[in-house]
Structures are given as structure tokens and as C-alpha cells.
Amino acid sequence: MVKFSRPAPWQTVPSSSPRKSFVGANECAARRRVLGRQLVEHDLDALVVSSGPNVRYLTGYTGSNGLAVLLPDRTMFFTDPRYRIQAAQEVDCSVRVVSGPMLPHVAQYLRRIKSRRIGFEKSHMTVEAHQTLKDALPMRSSLEPVVGWIERQRAVKSHQEISAIRRSVELNSQAYEQTAKHIRPGMRESELAAELDYRMRRQGAEGPAFETIVAAGARTALPHARPTSATLRGGALVLVDMGAMLDGYASDMTRMLFLGRPGTRVKRAYHAVLEAQLAAIDAVHGGVRAQAVDRAARRVLAGHGLAREFVHSTGHGLGLEIHEPPRIGKKEKTPLLSGMTITIEPGVYLEGFGGIRIEDTVAVTDNGCEVLTPTSKELRIL
């Protein structure tokens, strides 16, 4: 008889199967080495990484329950028995499969290796988790808050990551083009959103990167409108803001449509936003401060008398998450670096009339940027 047994607590699982992630093991290891050096510089013995995207970035793990303990010279990954096989296939560092809550096992591991100053992700660890870990550690150990270390590293993408984002962007645009051919008066906003999501998945996406935004008529003046049962009517604007997740990486695009023949006010507002978006794109290059890109868009809209109707930032970073550093806003002094992927999305919102937003995903280069979004920015007339 063949006996099957589940791994005991503290069992280390060898990473013997081929990794399924497109990011190579060497890249994950290089990322961890950067953080390992930061641990030494800040006199920390370990860093407990609990944020899902950060865990994926450092280990390649794509499951829903995992935690990494980073040391200056090695990393231990913790998960539960449900993910034993998956972790062996994806994770390129040591893996321990534990039963029950993970934090007591993490604390036991930290005690065994005599860690005293232990970093934790202040922006991601809950108060309850912090207290659980603190109570399980010896009195001589201290928990030290760490903010933004991994996120700042994630902000500059590798060539592999930019290729993944480009594929996500192209898939997203294909789903939009396929769906746009079937948009007609009488469709519900929710029906159009569902069709966009369906087309994404048909193209191979893991799903939408965020809840797809579809708004029609006066509702386009709501920057983050949720699709409703309202119908698309002739003589009205339609706003579509959509993004796909592919290989773990997000894309983001906003396009405008008009059902019928647009009037002069719509045309003027649209061309003002388009001019602002192109000006912001033209301002992007390695070394420029994020606020300068935002300023370029606002300057154009101010010239059209629409500055007060632009109520959000000009863009944001994206990657493993739909919103990542850097933020492209009025007061953001962060310099853009070659390899960052950001959105450029100025908009104007006029209550009772409607809103217009145009958004592309772009990759920052030393001398400018590459617009990854292939979809035409012209107002689409249906």
C-alpha cells in the first residue's frame, strides 16, 4: 500500500518543479538581494513581508496565502498545505508548509535564528497581526516599521515586467475594440461592462484589473462611476475605463464614445482634454518630477477655462497592482525614472453635462516615454 501523508509543520518543501511565472528565479533573487542590503544598512535582522503583491514580487508566488521572512542572506517562505504543490512550482527560495495560523510559526522561526530587530510592513500588517507577532516573540525582540522599501523597488520595472505590461495593455485594447463594434443605444451600462470583462477573459486575461467603469450621458461627470442599469441613449457621451490583469500585471485605459453626432460643446471639451493629455505625455522623461507632468496637463486645461473641472491627479504608476507609486499629482516631487510605467489620464467633469477623460499607459524612458496603448484617442462616433 502506498501511504500519503501531508507535510508536518516546519517541513521544508524543495522547489523541484519548473516555475510557471514568466519572471525568472534569478530576477526574484536579485530583488531579494537589494532588500537584503537594506536590512544590513538599517541594522535589521529580518523583514516580515505580508503584502500579497510584495510577496509575489520577491518570490514568484501567485497564491492567496503566503508570507515571506527576508534575511540579509536568505529568505523563508511560509504557506499552508493547500498551496504545497503550487509553492514548490513557483517559489525559488526555501518553503515551509505549516498548519494553522502562520504568524506563530513565523515567530518560532525568528526565535530559532535569534532575530532581534525585525522589520514589518507598516502599511500592510494589521494591528491584530502585529500584536500576535509581538506576543509570540521574546521580550528582547523588537518590531520595527518599514515603509515603502519594496514599493519603491517595484516602481522601476525590468524589461520582462514592461513586456508583461505591454501584453496586458494590448489584450485590453483588443477586448475594447471587439466590444466597441457591438455598442448600441439601448444597452445597459452594466451590460457593456460585462461584455468588456467577458472579452478580456476570452483573450486570456486573469480578469479585470479593477471594476470596469462604464458611464453614459450626465453620469460621465462621475470620475469613478459604477455601471448601473441605466441605458445608453442617442446624443450622449459614453465613458469606458477598463484594465486587464495578465501574468499578474495590470493595464489601464480610458476612451470616450458618442452615440450620434456630437455638438460643439462636446467637441471643444474633448479636444481640450486631448490636448492636455498629449502635453502631459510630451512632458514625460527620465528625471522630470511627477508634478511637472501634472502641471503640463493643467496648464492646457486652464487655457481652455477648464482647470477647475479637473478634479484628480494626472496619473499613477501601475504594475502588480493597478495603483502603485509614483503618483502624478500637483505636489509630487518624485523624479520619474526610466523603467517606470504610469498612466496619463487628465479629465474634465461638468455636472449636468458630462465628463471626458483620455487615458494611456506609458513606459518612461531616459529621453521621453513609450505610449504602450495602441487604441486611437479620437472620439469614437457610433
Image (cartoon, rainbow, N blue to C red):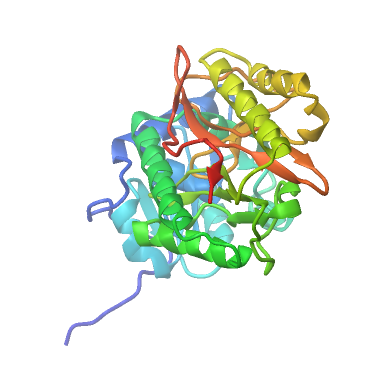
Q: Position of residue 64 (x, y in %)?
A: 49, 61
Which residue does the image show at 72% across and 23% down from the upper left?
Answer: 298
In this image, 362 relative to 227: left or right? Answer: left
Q: Position of residue 339 (x, y in %)?
A: 45, 25
In the foreground, 292 or 303? 303
Camera sees residue 10: no
Which residue does the image show at 51% across and 19% down from the upper left?
Answer: 337
The relative height of residue 279 versus residue 109 in the rendered view (above or below) is above
The relative height of residue 238 versus residue 336 in the rendered view (above or below) is below
The relative height of residue 141 versus residue 293 in the rendered view (above or below) is below
Q: Position of residue 2 (x, y in %)?
A: 18, 83
In this image, 92 relative to 282: left or right? Answer: left
The relative height of residue 194 versus residue 174 in the rendered view (above or below) is below
Which residue does the image show at 43% across and 42% down from the upper left?
Answer: 169
Camera sees residue 88: yes
Q: Residue at the left extreme?
A: 1
